Amino acid sequence: MTPVELSRTVLHAVRCAVDAGELRVTVPARAVVAPPGPGGWGDYATNVALQLARPAGQPALRVAEVIRPYLAAASGVTGVEITGPGFLNIRLTASAAEGLVRRILGEGLAYGHGDGLAGQVVSLRIPYDVRAEVVADALVRIVSSQGGRAEVAHGEPVTLRPVPAPEDPAPLGPDAARWALLHPAPHDRPRISADHLVQRESNPLFRVRYAHARTRALGRNAADLGFTSEPGPLGDLDHIDDHTDDHIDGHIDDRADDHIDVHVDRLLASLADHPRVLAAAATHRAPDRLARHLVTVADAVLPVLPAVLPRGEEKPSAAHRARLALAEAAGTVLAGGLSLLGIDAPEHL
């Protein structure tokens, strides 16, 4: 279930509560769903109860309690919890997660591409500036991924003017230079420094490319063990010791205290959110949204990777094949996103 589909499901639950006379509100046109924040639970959370509290004349917690059973009964939803002042936290069924992984692997690098800008021509008039050139170049591909066509030209009136880089980024090399110019928001001044080259977890570009390379390495390692990926149930992850989590430069990931199921939930949510992020990056002329999303995907997948391959005397099972499929799906999203930014996604790092 995609975030758009889940948003419709939330609105349907609200409509059911209204039809049953338990809420007296106008059903909103849109319900925001997003990965749960700190203290959240499950795959997604929505603030629709807080949104409806005032028009309903009831506390948000009461509104959430009314909506909860209708949402929990929806197809593809396996659980709903209320947290904080009235957030509805939603966990999707395993079949929904399996369907997402199948979709990503089936569509490959085109996952997230759509037709929201079909038939539209986006005019990008830019100044003679290296950052503007790089941002426009990325937007040509991102807009194309949504069915549109971007035309780039110089001169007035300028329609795309990101804050220029303080110095020439060329000494960083093509990939790091592009990342340095694309990762910050257009109104932020990019930082041109050797930090973009260090192979440490403090470097977002390194984490993204490292995560991609690790997913590809797992595929090679699995082939050596005689099995391939196949989407399905991920199996029991309770026995996985999170403190054997992924290491970068000798440091254990700083989210090791979270149970691995939390990381899986975050990963699935970030993968499902990829089409929305791509559409927003194209619509708002903001490749930085895609760059930051890739960091989110990388940070979500890295703690999951140690659970992919069999350990010790374990034999490859259906669960291992499903975990490998999830890792490969994450690698596909990372490779596709980097490609749209014009940055190489190495198989080895």
Image: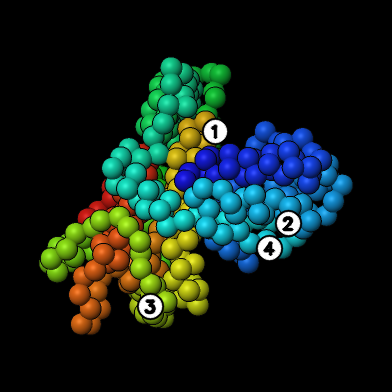
Q: Quadrant of residue 212?
A: bottom left
Q: Is disc 4 placed on a helix, strand or loop?
A: strand
For residue 65, the mark is 2
Q: Position of residue 137 (x, y in %)?
A: 38, 32
For residue 240, the mark is 3
The local crowd at label 2, few if under 14, some if 14 to 19, many if 20 or more residues have their Cα within 10 Å, is some
**Residue at image x 40%, y 69%?**
303
Depth check, mark 2 against mark 4: the one in front is: 2
For residue 83, the mark is 4
Q: Position of residue 122 (x, y in %)?
A: 47, 21
Residue bearing mark 1: 284
Q: Report how many numbered discs are placed on residues in the image.
A: 4
Q: Quadrant of residue 308?
A: bottom left
Q: Is disc 1 placed on a helix, strand or loop?
A: loop
Depth check, mark 2 against mark 3: the one in front is: 2
Is residue 28 in sight in this rendering? yes
**Residue at image x 46%, y 68%?**
261
Q: Is disc 2 placed on a helix, strand or loop?
A: helix
